[in-house]
């Protein structure tokens, strides 16, 4: 049996869409320290690390369900993605946008910040796990890739209940979401709209993830990323 491709993702629901053999999926977007530890341990027997799942759009032209493939990572660290791997993913998902992904561990919920980050970093999308996956890949000398599906558009404001929705193990914290709504009931219409958008994005995630396959070991042409650059001191999660 060949070494697996590690898959870093946010929630268990995202993880459940990728069922093909050859992937070892590690959800944990609600616990960056735990996610790093799990990836580091599993990386000893892996041949690459892929960041996968939902992303927020930073490019105003991206729509719910669109796919993005990273060629570069910006945010708490700066590094490049493996070009051969990115090309292979693009062949599996024709029409996916290739560009810079931003990640610093935060959920970016406001429209002005989304648009500002997109412009500042020439980034197309943002997620909460790619920086951790990239760091572990660099530390372990493994190739790194990002492939994500847009779950909220650049001009959509994420309501407060979404910011408390994730538990450390990647499951949904329904109690915290309910408490947020009871405390701030005015967010309910925005929350309903957001959930509807997530359902549409989930359908697209399931369709697209069914087409993703790890490369055969004999065809590996991946290379480990260059050492990441940390724009700000103390930025590691």
Image: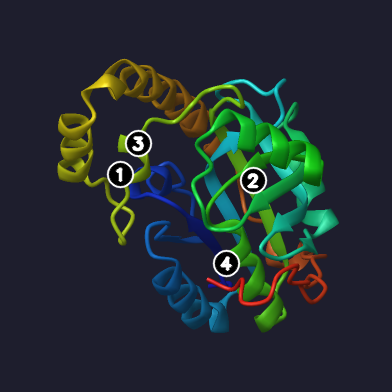
Q: Which residue is mark 1?
A: 165
State how far apart marks 4 and 3 are (Cα): 24 Å
- Report if the CB atoms under discs 3 and 1 are less than 8 Å apart: no
* Circle 4 residues within 10 Å: few <14, some 14–19, many ≥20: many
Mark 4 vs 3, N-terminal side? 4
SS of the residue under disc 2: strand
* Residue 214 in view in this figure: yes
Q: Which residue is mark 2?
A: 147
Q: Name above or below for residue 72 compared with residue 220.
A: above
Residue at 74% over, 55% down: 74
Mark 4 vs 1, N-terminal side? 4
Q: Which residue is mark 4?
A: 132
Q: Which residue is mark 3?
A: 160
Frontmost of labels 3 and 2 is 3
Frontmost of labels 2 and 1 is 1
SS of the residue under disc 1: loop
Mark 2 vs 4, N-terminal side? 4
**Left or right placement of residue 200 versus residue 114 in this view:** left
State how far apart marks 2 and 1 are (Cα): 22 Å
Determine the image quadrant of residue 62.
Answer: top right
Mark 2 vs 1, N-terminal side? 2
């Amino acid at each position: 049996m060949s070494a697996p491709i590690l898959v870093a993702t946010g929630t268990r629901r995202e993880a459940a869409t990728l069922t093909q053999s050859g992937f070892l999926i590690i959800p944990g977007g609600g616990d960056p320290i735990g996610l790093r530890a799990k990836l580091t341990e599993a990386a000893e027997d892996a041949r690459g690390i892929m960041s996968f799942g939902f992303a927020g759009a930073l490019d105003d032209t991206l729509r719910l369900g669109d796919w993005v493939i990273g060629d570069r990572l910006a945010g708490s660290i700066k590094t490049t993605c493996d070009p051969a791997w990115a090309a292979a993913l693009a062949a599996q998902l024709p029409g996916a946008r290739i560009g810079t992904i931003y990640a610093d561990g935060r959920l970016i919920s406001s429209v002005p910040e989304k648009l500002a980050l997109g412009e500042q970093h020439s980034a197309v999308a943002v997620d909460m796990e790619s920086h951790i996956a990239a760091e572990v890949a660099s530390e372990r000398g493994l190739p790194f890739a990002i492939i994500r599906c847009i779950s909220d558009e650049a001009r959509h404001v994420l309501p407060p209940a979404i910011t408390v929705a994730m538990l450390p193990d990647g499951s949904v914290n329904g109690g915290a979401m309910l408490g947020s709504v009871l405390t701030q009931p005015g967010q309910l219409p925005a929350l309903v709209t957001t959930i509807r958008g997530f359902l549409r994005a989930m359908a697209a995630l399931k369709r697209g993830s069914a087409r993703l396959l790890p490369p055969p070991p004999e065809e590996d042409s991946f290379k480990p990323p260059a050492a990441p650059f940390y724009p700000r001191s103390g930025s590691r999660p």
